[in-house]
Image (tube, grey):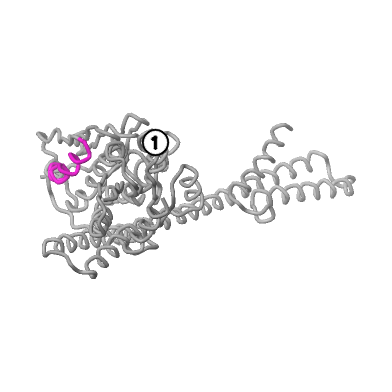
Amino acid sequence: MQKIIIIEDERSLQKTLSDGLIQDGFEVFSALDGETGIALAKKEKPDLILLDLILPKMDGFEVLRQLKMGEETKSSMVIVLTNLESSGDVEKVLELGATTYLVKANYGLQEIIEKIKETLNKK
Amino acid sequence: MANSSSLTLNIFKQCRIRAVPLWQCPQFLFLVMGVINIASMILAYVFGRDLLSVEFVIVIVVSIAIVLLFLSYIITRNFEKLMELNQMKTEFISIISHQLRTPLSATRWAVSTMLAGGQTEEDKLSYLALLKENNDRMVRLLNDLLLVARIEQGRVDFKPQKFLMQDVAAQVVNNFKNYAKANNVNIVVEGGDENCLVMADPEYIKLVIQNLVDNSVRYIVKKGQVTVKTFLKRGNVVCAVKDTGVGIPLSDQNQIFQKFFRSKNVMRYQTEGTGLGLFIAKAIIEFSGGKMYFKSKENQGSIFYFTLPIAKK
């Protein structure tokens, strides 16, 4: 079973997304802030991490940087899932090592799950 | 001379910052106008020197220069204010649309999950609760906007009555207990033994304390303490909300009560926030006959105070 960690502080988004992914047969772990997310990633070594950029205490850019620098976490793919969409943000996260970047408001839940499967298949 | 050249450079810089072409930039246009005026006066003197004395021309040139400087100062200042306001509105629209996007995405996803079917009754109820919560959030945001509009038009409907400030403060602190705990913040209420009787609309005063406490809890990184204290001072009832949060940078301190303004260091920690809370709080207190002020130090914390006159028994 493929493992996914969702790092998202919005409980509603966190819940709908994790329910959807569980239904599609993934093993899902959730973190409401960056620090917990990084600790969880070290422990679980997931196939994929879904990362929000706006997080309390440590922002998503910093979380991404630390994930990609950490020996245990750098091999997990990261999809950045956010509502920020300036071209600068997109470039920055791709530069930092994210696999892809999705704007939440532009996709329905099923479309996002399809994108996640596509990304995992490319691995 | 060095002074005037740095002034000229400054004008070019100002126009560039505001992203206005030179020929539309009042600072530059006034400079050109001044130069033309003074040059034309000097030329007139050169040709008509038999008729005018040097002293007379100097007085005229200097006084016209002063008048021009004064006028250009007023007009450019207003122009700058407009540009700032415009910039803030643009930022505000992006904040509001971002704030609406999150609950909209959540409701969209929840509805599509429900439509796909296959949930237990319990699941369905939790999805309905989620829809309600996000709906409430959008309503709150729009209510804030409407309140701001009413404040600006002076149409706020206050229903003043006598009440004890410490009671309202304790009520707010109580409501925040769980939220604070979840954020690693210890929240306490102090004072309250004095008779802090005021005449105001308790619902609005509650909103003010809520806004202040909400900011305090929100902008504490990792863990900290929020203290709400009520006391009497020089014929006023004072309420102070103190936190050990990120504080407000000195450069932002004179702007924090402005509508839509959000401090730069705050944006780094949290983006939920409309930049309306303090504007609303200050306006309510001033409408109720009080004052609001604060002390803050970056990385140490802030104390927000507001006063209301003591009510006669």
Residue B145: where, in percent of width, then height? 33, 59
Residue B304 visible within the image = no
Specify whether B149 is left or right of B183.
right
Residue B232: where, in percent of width, then height? 18, 34
The amino acid sitting under disc 1 is Gln
- Taking depth in this image into account, of B201 and B211 the one nearest to the observer is B211
Q: Residue at x 37, y 40 (%)?
A: A63
- Taking depth in this image into account, of B290 and B140 the one nearest to the observer is B140
Magenta residue check for B172: yes
Magenta residue check for B247: no
Circle 1 — which element? helix
Within 10 Å of disc 1 (Cα), the crowding (few <14, some 14-19, many 20+) is some
Q: Quadrant of residue A24?
A: bottom left
Q: Which residue is mark 1?
A: A66
Residue B124 visible within the image = yes
Chain containing mark 1 = A
Check the picture and name the quadrant holding the C terminus of chain B.
Answer: top left
Residue B134: where, in percent of width, then height? 25, 59
Q: Which residues are magenta?
A: B170-185
User: In the rendered view, would you say A86 is above or below B174?
Assistant: below
Specify whether A91 is left or right of B202.
right
Specify whether B208 is left or right of B259.
left
